[in-house]
Image: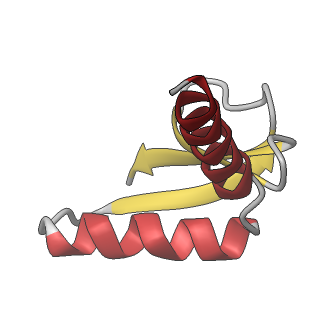
Amino acid sequence: MKQVILGLGLLLSAGTLMAAQLPCADLQAQIDAKLQAKGVKGYSLEAVAKGSAADKTVVGSCEAGSKEIVYSRK
């Protein structure tokens, strides 16, 4: 039973690590598609260095956490 729980824990952590390593262009396209599907208009998405989001909303992390995708209204 302990092995099953350990295995599930490793699988979950591996999925999280792989998601964080997405190229910024791919993640930005996924977020853009979700926003368009919800009917959101008049926004911009931009990949910036981690910690330099200023007054914009961080909506994702990419390239192993070194960059962030930020959302701002136009």
Give residue 51's position: percent from left, percent from top.
78, 25
Q: Residue 37's spot in the image, x, y percent?
A: 18, 74
Q: Is residue 58 above or below residue 51?
A: below
Q: Which of 19 and 69 is in front in this view?
A: 19
Q: Viewer-proximal residue, 39 or 7?
A: 7
- The tally of labels here is 0
- Which residue is farthest left? 39
Residue visible at 56% across and 67% down in the picture: 28
Residue visible at 19% across and 62% down in the picture: 40
Residue at the outermost front position: 1
Q: Which residue is depicted at the point 68% across and 39% down? A: 10
Q: Is residue 38 above or below residue 8?
A: below
Query: Which picture quadrant has residue 63?
Result: bottom right
| Residue 43: quadrant of the picture | bottom left
Q: Quadrant of the C terminus?
A: bottom left
Drawn side of residue 59 relative to residue 13, left or right: left
Residue under the point 63% across and 40% down: 7
* Residue 73: % across, % down: 36, 48
**Residue 68 left/right relative to 56:** right
The one of 11 and 26 positioned closer to us in this rendering:
11
* Rendered image coloring scheme: secondary structure
Could you say which quadrant of the image residue 31 lies in?
Answer: bottom left
Q: In this view, does 52 lie above or below 8?
A: above
